[in-house]
Image (spheres, rainbow, N blue to C red):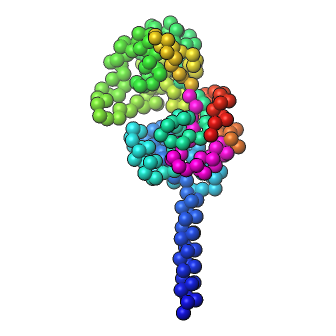
Amino acid sequence: MKTPIRILTALALGLGLASAQAEQATLKVCSAENEMPYSNKDGEGFENKLAQYIAQQMGRKLEIVAWTDPRYFIRDYVDKGLCDVVMGVDHGDPRLYTTVPYYRSGYVFVSREKDGLDLKNWDSETLKKAQRIAFVPGTPAETMLRSIGRYNDMFNYQHELTGFKSKRNQYVKYENDKLVNEVASGKAEVAVLWGPAAARYVKSASTPLTMTVIPDNNKRSDGEKVGFHYSTAIGVRKGEVALLEQLNKLIRDKRDEIAELLEAEGIPLLDEPETALSMN
């Protein structure tokens, strides 16, 4: 009578092991529901494409866990174990473990090719004279516009870009394609955007546009440096050391292939500081 019990026990253990292995074979990635060109709920966007590539290289099935509000997704999704990793976080984000960077890029000036604007840095006469400069508040662009005395000039225009929505207690979104189109249509002379956010729309614009990477040596009026170049990594839930190490190895081994995916998007890629590559 003991043999059937042993068999049933073995089957139960086997099913449990198979279930655990099936769960382990899935890579759950937290991804924005509507934050193009990074990702959307339909699996589009370059970050979703990168997530698919990484899952394939790991031999795992990709599962996208969509979030809607960037202010809370780490607390409400990652920390609660609803997903394993997050694509596209700042290298060194203290809320997560972060991998070695998989790319480095910078903020850019976007302008029309035919205008031939001199946009080498924030001392450009173009920025002092432009009637409209499109930018996203809360970014280094705002800091420098304040520093050169142009922020207040753009106040009404910035509210126009979001339909005059109030920021109080809500997430007010600035659409990257809209800001690029402001330049393409001639409504604004310049847009200042994160390069990876602008690249797709600059590339597909009906009016030829150009991106100029902003130097990383800018300073506020008080002399404090304002960074415009940043390294991007994959965020991993704290405690998942083995997964972090696996992703680090994959990024180092497949750096050229990852770069090809990003270059196809038109993203301006910058050299990574040696210190960042040796971390983790």
Report the residue at 47% width, 13% height from top: 220
Pick the quarter of the image with the C terminus. Answer: top right
On the image, the x and y values in percent for residue 154 come to 37, 16
On the image, the x and y values in percent for residue 165 come to 30, 29
Q: In terms of depth relative to the viewer, which is nearer, 114 or 48?
A: 48
Residue 204 appears in view: no
On the image, the x and y values in percent for residue 252 come to 68, 41
Instruction: Look at the picture and state if 48 lies above or below 212.
Output: below
Q: In terms of depth relative to the viewer, which is nearer, 208 or 161?
A: 161
Count of labels shown? 0
Report the residue at 41% width, 44% height from top: 75
Instruction: Look at the picture and state if 137 lies above or below 10.
Output: above
53 part of magenta stretch: no
Residue 91 appears in view: yes
232 part of magenta stretch: yes
Find the residue positioned furthest to the bottom: 1
Report the residue at 55% width, 50% height from top: 240
Segment tinted magenta in the rendering: 230-251
Report the residue at 57% width, 84% height from top: 7
Pick the quarter of the image with the N terminus. Answer: bottom right
Q: In terms of depth relative to the viewer, which is nearer, 185 or 139?
A: 139
Q: In terms of depth relative to the viewer, which is nearer, 246 or 271?
A: 246
On the image, the x and y values in percent for residue 237 come to 51, 47
Q: Is residue 149 left or right of residue 8?
A: left
Instruction: Look at the picture and state if 243 lies above or below 92.
Output: below
